[in-house]
Amino acid sequence: MTLRAYRIKPNSKLQLKKFDPSETGPYKKTDRDKKRVKAKTESAIRRIRGLQERLYASGQRAFLLVLQGMDTSGKTARSSTSCPE
């Protein structure tokens, strides 16, 4: 599954039940892939932070980032570092 499969088109209805919560995309649950995912996530956070600053500065648009994960998966830590209030 590619990341395009996770994009929600404007004015469409989001149905989370259509997404498998155990889906890991091209990554396996190995230590090597976990390190790769962590590095990609940190890079994505930096990019999202920059884009969010530009959106905030324009005062015209917003974005919604939905994080789905098991308890203790770090959702709170990620959201506070990616999108500070």
Image: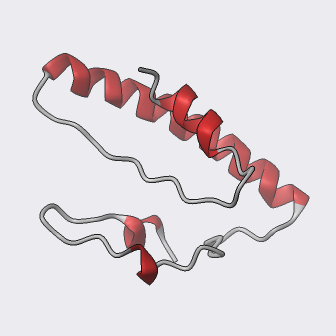
What residue is at 52 percent from the left and 77 percent from the top?
Answer: 1
- Residue 23 locus on image (x, y percent): 62, 75
Q: How many marks?
A: 0
Task: Please state which of residues 51 and 8 is positioned toward the viewer in this rendering.
Answer: 8
Tell me which residue sits at (41%, 67%) in the image. 6
Using the image, determine if residue 18 lies above or below residue 83: below
Residue 73 position within the rendered picture, expressed as x and y whole percent measured from the top left: 71, 51
Name the residue at the top extreme.
57
Drawn side of residue 42 relative to residue 4, left or right: right
Quadrant hosting residue 62? top left
Q: Where is residue 41 in the image (x, y as percent from the top left)?
A: 61, 44
Q: Locate residue 51 relative to residue 42 in the image: left or right.
A: left
* Residue 31 as seen in the image, left or right of residue 28: right
Q: What residue sits 23% from the left and 27% below the top? A: 55
Q: In which quarter of the image is residue 77?
A: top right
Residue 12 higher or lower than 50, as above or below: below
